[in-house]
Image (cartoon, rainbow, N blue to C red):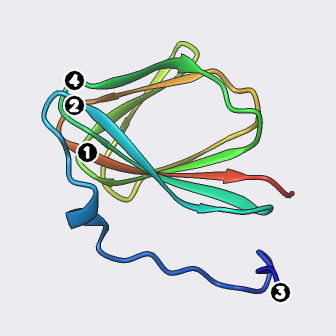
Amino acid sequence: MPADPLTDHVVVTGLREALPVTPAATTSRALVDNDAVRIVMFTFDTGERLTEHTASMPAVLTLIEGAMDLALGEEVHALEPGDCAYLPAHAPHSLEARSPSRLSLLLLRRA
C-alpha cells in the first residue's frame, strides 16, 4: 500500500555528516518529496548564491546555521540561524551566503 503523505511520517537524520558545506559550492538534497510537500536541505559556502528565481508553489525558508542575505525584490533581509521567511508562489527572490550556511526549504504543494 502506498504511503499517505498526510498521515505517514518521515524522519531524516545525520544531515550534518551526509551533506557537509563544500568549499566554493552550493549543494542540495531532497529530504521529503511527496504529494503534500517537498523539503530540501541546501548548503552554501561563503559567497555562494542562488540568483533571482521564483517557485511555482509557496515556500518556507529556514536558516539552520550560518548567515545569509535574502533578497525579495529590492528588499534585502539579513538572515541569522533560526530566522525564517514565507514566500508566496511566484515571488522573485535570491540568496547569498555571508558565511558557510545550511538552509531548509519547504515547498507547500497543498494549501
Point out the frontmost of discs 4 and 2.
4
Residues at marks 1 and 4 touching, judged by CB atoms closer than 8 Å: no
Q: Which percent across, then down, holds residue 104? A: 46, 53
Give the labeled residue for mark 3. 1
The answer to whether 90 is drawn above or below residue 13 in the figure is above
The answer to whether 6 is drawn above or below residue 81 in the figure is below
- Viewer-nearest residue: 19 or 51: 19
Amino acid type of the residue that numbered disc 4 sits on in the rendered structure: Gly
The label shown at residue 101 is 1
Q: Residue at x 53, y 12 (%)?
A: 74
Q: Secondary structure at mark 4?
A: loop
Task: Specify the quadrant that holds the C terminus.
Answer: bottom right
Q: Which percent across, then down, holds residue 51? A: 46, 17
- Earlier in the chain: of badge 3 and badge 1, it is 3
Mark 1 neighbour class, 10 Å CA radius: few under 14, some 14 to 19, many 20 or more: many
The answer for how far apart the CA atoms under marks 1 and 4 are is 10 Å
- Earlier in the chain: of badge 1 and badge 4, it is 4
Give the labeled residue for mark 2. 98
- Earlier in the chain: of badge 3 and badge 4, it is 3
The answer for how far apart the CA atoms under marks 1 and 2 are is 8 Å
Residues at marks 1 and 2 touching, judged by CB atoms closer than 8 Å: yes
Q: Residue at x 31, y 34 (%)?
A: 26
Give the labeled residue for mark 4. 47
The answer to whether 110 is drawn above or below residue 4 in the figure is above
Point out the frontmost of discs 3 and 1.
3
Q: Residue at x 72, y 63 (%)?
A: 34
- Earlier in the chain: of badge 4 and badge 2, it is 4
